[in-house]
Amino acid sequence: MDRRGFNRRVLLGGAAVATSLSVAPEIDRAVAATGTAPAGGATRHLKLYIEELPGGQLGYGLEKGKATIPGPLIECNEGDTLHIEVENTLDVAASLHVHGLDYEISSDGTRQNKSHVEPGATRTYTWRTHKPGRRADGTWRAGSAGYWHYHDHVVGTDHGTGGVRKGLFGPVIVRRQGDVLPDRTVTVVFNDLLINNLPPHSGPNFEATVGDRVEWIVITHGEYYHTFHVHGHRWADNRTGLLTGPDDPSQVIDNKICGPADSFGFQVIAGEGVGAGAWMYHCHVQSHSDMGMVGLFLVKKTDGTIPGYDPDDHDHEHAHGSASGSAPGQKQEQGHQHGQGHEH
Amino acid sequence: MDRRGFNRRVLLGGAAVATSLSVAPEIDRAVAATGTAPAGGATRHLKLYIEELPGGQLGYGLEKGKATIPGPLIECNEGDTLHIEVENTLDVAASLHVHGLDYEISSDGTRQNKSHVEPGATRTYTWRTHKPGRRADGTWRAGSAGYWHYHDHVVGTDHGTGGVRKGLFGPVIVRRQGDVLPDRTVTVVFNDLLINNLPPHSGPNFEATVGDRVEWIVITHGEYYHTFHVHGHRWADNRTGLLTGPDDPSQVIDNKICGPADSFGFQVIAGEGVGAGAWMYHCHVQSHSDMGMVGLFLVKKTDGTIPGYDPDDHDHEHAHGSASGSAPGQKQEQGHQHGQGHEH
Amino acid sequence: MDRRGFNRRVLLGGAAVATSLSVAPEIDRAVAATGTAPAGGATRHLKLYIEELPGGQLGYGLEKGKATIPGPLIECNEGDTLHIEVENTLDVAASLHVHGLDYEISSDGTRQNKSHVEPGATRTYTWRTHKPGRRADGTWRAGSAGYWHYHDHVVGTDHGTGGVRKGLFGPVIVRRQGDVLPDRTVTVVFNDLLINNLPPHSGPNFEATVGDRVEWIVITHGEYYHTFHVHGHRWADNRTGLLTGPDDPSQVIDNKICGPADSFGFQVIAGEGVGAGAWMYHCHVQSHSDMGMVGLFLVKKTDGTIPGYDPDDHDHEHAHGSASGSAPGQKQEQGHQHGQGHEH
C-alpha cells in the first residue's frame, strides 16, 4: 500500500475529515464508491494504555492520557498481524481479550492462562487474522472478517465484570479484500443500561450528511439483553450487514436482539430513501428506552440543516446530548486505527 | 391488477374464505401454487382509527368502532406507496410508527419530531417501499420486502410504552414480486406476558386444514425476551422463512429467541409430513408457557376432524380458548388489507 | 451400510476411541476428511429409559440404570425413521418431545394430546425425517437436517418445567447426505444457571487434540437467556456452523444469544490457527459466568501437553472439574447412537 493509498484509507475512515463527506448528497443519490478494502498481510505494532478516567471509569487509549470509552477502533484486513503492547497504568491487574481473531493461548487475556497484565506492567498481545480458503479436506475455512471487539477479562472478576462495567471495551473490524469501505464508522456499546457508558438520556448522537456511507458497529456488554433499533434505516442480518446481491437470502432488519459480547455491524447510506432528519436509535426494550438508552442519528441536508430538529427544543432534551457529545474520556465516533502510528 | 386478480388476492389472503382452503389436502400432498406477489408500484390510501377498547385496551382499526388487537394487517408489494390517514379518537396524543419501510421524518410517528397525532386530530403518514437494485457505486440495495410491524410511539412515554402495552400495534408485510402468497396469514404478538393481549391460557388458536399454506407473522413487544416455538412445523431463519433452494445455507428452526420490536415471518404447509392435530405453539421460556403464553394451531383433516382433540376436554382447557376466540376488539386472524377500501 | 461402514461411523462418532483422534495434528494442519454422512432411509428401533438419578435429578438412558444428563445423542440421516420405545421408571407421568423432526400428533409427547407415558408404562414414539426437495407447486421444502433436541413435556407442569429442570433433555442431530462427519461430538446444555446440570464452576471440560474436528451442539433450557462464547474458535451462524463456500453470506461468530429450546451446532478444528491451550467456553452474561457457567475446551498438543495449563493450579480451580468430569449419571461427551443397538 503506497502512501497515497494509506492516506486514502485514513481519510475515508477518519472522523477528522468530515469536510470531505458532504459532496452533493441528496435523497437517493447514488454515492460514488468510496473504495474497497485492500489485501491484508501487513504486520503492525500498536500500543494501548489501560487508564483510569474521571468518575471511576476505565478506558483503553492509543496515547497516554487519552483513553476513551469505547476504546479506539482497531481495524485491519484479513491476513494482517497485530502486535499490541498493553501498558496497565491501573493499580489492579487487567487484560486485553479479543473476539473473533486468531491468538495463541498466551494472548488469551485471562488470569487462568496467566495472560493478564500486572499493575504497572506491560504485555504484548499478538492477534493474527487469516483469509478464507479451502482446507485440504475440501471443507471451507471461514476468514477472520467480521465486526468483533476486545475487552478486559480480569478486573473485578475472572471474567472482567468490573473492567467491562467501567468501560474497558472497544471495537475491532477485520475487513476482507473487496469489502466496501465506509465514509465513517460509529460505535454503539450497550453496556448494562447505558450506551458507551454515557449518562442516560445523553446520546451519543452521530452526525452525517445525506448520502454518507455510515458504518455502525454494535456491541453489547454486561448483564442484560437488548434490542438495537434505528429509525428509517435497516440492514441485512449477515456478515457485512449488506446483502451480497439478489440471491442473498438474509433477513433485512431494523431491530436485533443481542446479549453480552454479541457484536454485529452494517453500513447505511444516511437518509437513503427517507431524507434528512433526527433519526432515533435506541434499545427497544421499553423500560430501557424509557430509562434513556437512546441517541440520535443526525442526518443533515447538504446545507447543514435537519428538518424538524432544534437541538434546544424541549422535545429533544431526552436524547440530544451535545452534538460533539463526549464526557471526559468518551467519544462517539471512531478514528480508524491501522496501527501505523506505532510502527516499530 | 384487474378486478379478477384483485379478488384473487383478497380471497387468498382473507380469513373469510376458509371454504376455498380445503381442497383435497392430505399428508405431504403437494399443494397447488397459490400464486405469487405481483409487481408493486401502486399508490393507496387507508384510514386508521386509534380507539379505546373494553377493559382499557387500545387498538387500531380500519373502520370506526372496529379496532382490533393486533391492528389490521397492512400488506403491500415492493414499490407501493401508502398514505395512511390516522384519526386519533383518544383523549391523549398517539401516533403511528412503522418498522422497515421508507418514510420521511415527518412520518416518524414520534413526539420528538412532532409527527404524532393530537387527541381528536388527524394526520396522514406516508410509507414508501422500494424494490431491490444495484446502486451506482455497485453495491446492492436491499428491497423493502419483509415481515414488519407498526406501533404507537407516544402514549404513556416518548417510546409509546403505554400505547404498546394496551394494544397499539399491528403487522405489516411487504412482498417482493414472485414471493409465494399464502392461503391465510395469522399474527402472533408476544406482548409482555400475553399473546395478542388476550388473557393467559386463552389462545389465540388458529384453524387450518392439512395442506393449507399458512403464513405466520410473529412480533414481540414490551419488556421481556421470548422464544417462539411451534410443534410439528418449522421454518428457515431467513427473509421469507422459506429456503430459496438447495444452496440456501440458512438454519431451519422451530424455536427462535426474540425481543421487543423484533419481527419475523414464515409459511408452513399445515400438517406437512405430520398430519392433522392440535399443535401447540408457545413461548418456550418455561415460566412464560406455564403462565399461559400458549395457543393451538388446529390442523384439521379434510373431514374437519382433528385426531385426539376434544375442545371440551379438560386437558385442553389451558389453551383452547374459543375457536373463533376473540375478546371484544380482538381477532386472531388477519384479513389482508391492500388499501383499496379507502381509495381516494 | 455394511459392518465395516457401521463400525467406522461409530468409531468416528464415539468418545471411546480417542486414541484414533491424535494422528499427527499440528497447528493449521489440514485434517484428512473424516468422511461424510451417507444417504438415509433406514428404520431403527431404540429404547430409552426415563430414570431417577442421585440428588433428585432425572435422565434419559439407552440402558437401564445408565441414564445421563444430557441424555444420549440421537443421530440419524435425512430419510431415517426412528421408533423409540420409552419406558418411564418414574412414579410420575413423563414424556419425550422432539424438536425439528416429523412426528404425528400421537408422538407429540404432551399430556394435551395424551401422548405421555404413565408411571411404569411404556410408549413408542415415532420420529421421521425427510430429505429436502421441490414441492409440486415449485417451492423448496427444507430437509430435516439440523441440530435439534428432545425433552420431557410433562413432569412438573404441562410444559415439562420440572422434568427439564431436573435433566430430562438430550441432543438430536439429523445429517444430510454429504455433511462432513466430526471426529467427536460434545453437548453443552445451558439449563437455568447450570451447564449439563453440573454444579457451578465444575465444567464440563472437553478434551481434544490439535487438528481434531470437534462438533458442538449447544442447547438452552429453562428460564434465562444466555450468550454462548468459546475462546479462540468461531463458527458460521447457519445450518451446519460451517460456511458452504466463499458465497455463503452468513455471519461468522464466536458468541451467540440463545433462549430456552434454541439449539445450534457447529464444527471446529481444535486449535486451528491458535494452537493447543485450555480454551474457556462460557456464558458471556457477566453474572452467569461469574456464578460458574464456564468450562474448558482442553486442546492438547500431540504429545498430550497443554501449554500454560496445570489442572491443579489454583487459577484453574474455577473451571477445571475433573478431566473425565462426570457426576453420577452425567457425562460430557456423547457416544453417537445410531439405533442399531436395539434393532428389532
Image (spheres, coloured by chain):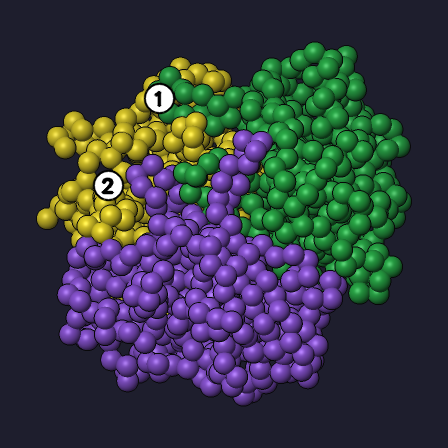
Chain colours: A green, B purple, C yellow
The crowd level at tag 1 (other Cα within 10 Å; few <14, some 14-19, many 20+) is few
**For the point 32% across and 47% down, which residue is it?**
C172
| Residue C225 coordinates in the image, percent (x, y) | 54, 55
Q: Is residue C228 left or right of residue A107?
A: left
Q: Quadrant of residue C221?
A: bottom left
Mark 2 crowd level (few <14, some 14–19, many ≥20, 10 Å Cα): many
- Identify the residue at image location x=35%, y=50%: B178
Q: Is residue C342 above or below residue B9?
A: above
Q: Residue at position x 58%, y 48% from top? A: A234
Residue B279, by quadrant, is bottom left
Instruction: State which chain disc 2 sits on.
Output: C
Q: Is residue B198 visible?
A: yes
Q: Please state, as top left, top right, bottom left or bottom right, where the N terminus of chain B lies in the image.
A: bottom left
Residue designated by label 2 = C77
Whether discs 2 and 1 lie on one chain: the answer is: no
Using residue B249 as the reference point, say whether residue A45 is left or right of it.
Answer: right
Real-space CA distance between mark 2 and mark 1, rounded to the nearest whole angstrom? 21 Å
- Residue A88 x/y as whole percent: 81, 30
Q: Chain of mark 1?
A: A
Q: Is any part of residue A129 visible from this angle? A: no
Residue A138 is marked as 1
The spot of residue B45 in percent (x, y) is 52, 68
Closer to us: A278 or C315: A278
Identify the amino acid type marked 1.
Answer: Gly
Number of the label disc, if any, that sits on residue B92: none
The correct choice, above or below, for C323 with respect to A47 in the image is below
